[in-house]
Image (spheres, grey):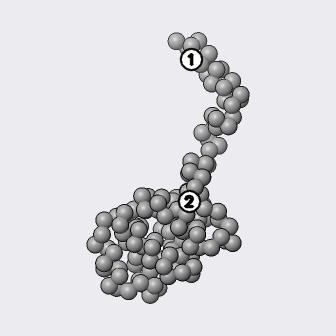
Amino acid sequence: MKPQRSVLKKIIVIINKSFPDYFPDSRSVTPQRNVPAEDRVPADHRVPAEERLFSVRTELVTRLSDAVLNQLLDELLVKKIITQEEMNLVKTKHKEDKARDVIDMALSKGSETSLFLISAICEQDPWLAKRLNFS
């Protein structure tokens, strides 16, 4: 059984060397590489915050956890970006609808609020922020 395994390993090495773009070494793959191109957001701050946030809206809706969404709502409330009534209304919704509302509220309130939400996401969910190229 060992000779077969050895041959198989040699074949894999040859294939990887012959087609590096198709078979990247898993140790060298960054999380960003796994994000679809349309979901990548340039970390470049010259891109308006609203555009950065809107370009990953779909992924945020599916990936933000309920706990993180509640933390984001708390931060928006503390900064007086949203009212207690807005927070209470959003908190009663299901996770995906809650995420949509949080993102859409930030987008509707302008660049400064969108940038604040991006920063809060970076703080509350660093892995997701890195995946979306926020940080």
- Residue at figure coordinates x 37%, y 63% from the top left: 96
Q: Is residue 19 left or right of residue 77?
A: right
Residue 21: image tag: none
Vertical side of 61 occupied by 7: above or below = above
SS of the residue under disc 1: helix
- In this view, the residue farthest toward the right is 18
Q: Is residue 72 visible?
A: no
- Residue 52: x and y, percent? 58, 67
The answer to which of 82 and 2 lies nearer the viewer is 82
Look at mark 2 in the image and give the residue it sits on: 132
Looking at the rendered structure, the kind of residue marked 2 is Leu
SS for callout 2:
loop
Q: In this rendering, which labeled residue sits more in front, label 1 or label 2?
A: 2
Furthest-left residue in this view: 92
Q: Quadrant of residue 63?
A: bottom left
Above or below — where is 46 with respect to 8? below
Q: Position of residue 3 (x, y in %)?
A: 59, 12
> Can I make out residue 96 in this image?
yes
Give the residue drawn at x 59%, y 19%: 8
- Give me the residue at 61% from left, 48% from top: 33
The three-letter code of the residue at mark 1 reads Arg
* Labels 1 & 2 near each other (Cβ < 8 A): no
| Closer to us: 3 or 120 | 120
Q: Quadrant of the C terminus?
A: bottom right
Reading the image, the residue beneath label 1 is 5
